[in-house]
Image (cartoon, grey):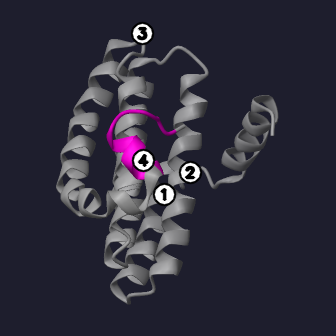
């Protein structure tokens, strides 16, 4: 899908959301549904909800990044960025609950890598916000590293990822 089509579809979607229901409140509703499924050990349902929430927050950030951010937009962007990072952690938690440590580690590493890229953004507010979140993602990834290192000889892709030979996109 072209980025222009993606942005048009995203704009149509967000325009259709009730005025009182911001992107973040919609994200929150989806996260609550995911959390309820997670607590009921319905991990596939939780994962589906969390992936939907991840798309919501990512699309919101994408729309805001299309223009030069005003002061109030920066705060909304920071909230969407925090929502995205929380969602990535929730997805990783789903994997951990199913003893899928490699997938959890990949999820957290992808979040860390995305924050590293945003930390180089020309807007200092975005850069600083991403750097803070990146540190948290990295710390959580390190907590999973011992589980992954034990199994790394079974999955060459993870071994390469941990050794810095490949990156996630």
Which residue has dot 3 on it?
A: 122
Q: Secondary structure at mark 4?
A: helix
Q: Residues within 10 Å of mark 1 (few under 14, many from 20)?
A: many
Q: Which image quarter holds the N terminus? A: top right
Q: What residue is at 75 percent from the left and 38 percent from the top?
A: 6
Return the x and y of residue 89 as percentages of the image width and height. 33, 57
Q: Which residue is mark 1?
A: 27
As measured in the structure, the alpha-carbon distance from the residue carrying label 3 to the one carrying label 4 is 20 Å
Of labels 1 and 2, earlier in sequence is 1
Residue 161 inside the magenta-drawn segment: yes
- In-front residue for pair 38/11: 38
Q: Quadrant of residue 118?
A: top left
**Relative horizontal placement of residue 2, taking residue 164 as reference (left or right):** right
* Cα distance between the residues tagged 2 and 3: 24 Å
- Helix, strand, or loop for circle 1? helix
Q: Are marks 1 and 2 in contact (CB under 8 Å)?
A: yes
Give the SS element for disc 2. Answer: helix
Of 14 and 138, the residue lying toward us: 138
Mark 2 lies on residue: 56
Q: Is residue 20 left or right of residue 112?
A: right
Q: Which residues are magenta?
A: 157-168
Residue 84, label in figure: 4
- The earlier-in-sequence mark between 4 and 2 is 2
Mark 2 Cα within 10 Å, few/some/many (few <14, many 20+)?
many
Q: CA distance from mark 4 to mark 2?
A: 8 Å
Left or right side of 29 for 152? left
């Amino acid at each position: 899908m072209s980025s222009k089509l993606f942005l048009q579809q995203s704009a149509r979607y967000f325009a259709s959301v009730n005025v009182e229901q911001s992107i973040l409140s919609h994200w929150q509703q989806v996260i609550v549904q995911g959390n309820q499924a997670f607590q009921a050990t319905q991990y596939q349902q939780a994962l589906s909800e969390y992936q939907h929430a991840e798309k919501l927050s990512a699309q919101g950030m994408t729309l805001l990044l299309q223009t030069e951010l005003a002061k109030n937009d920066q705060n909304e962007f920071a909230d969407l960025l925090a929502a995205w990072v929380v969602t990535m952690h929730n997805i990783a938690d789903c994997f951990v609950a199913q003893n899928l440590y490699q997938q959890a580690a990949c999820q957290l590493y992808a979040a860390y890598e995305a924050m590293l890229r945003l930390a180089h953004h020309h807007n200092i507010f975005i850069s600083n916000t991403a750097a803070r979140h990146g540190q948290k993602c990295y710390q959580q990834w390190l907590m999973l590293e011992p589980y992954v290192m034990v199994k790394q000889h079974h999955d060459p892709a993870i071994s390469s990822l941990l050794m810095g030979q490949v990156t996630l996109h």
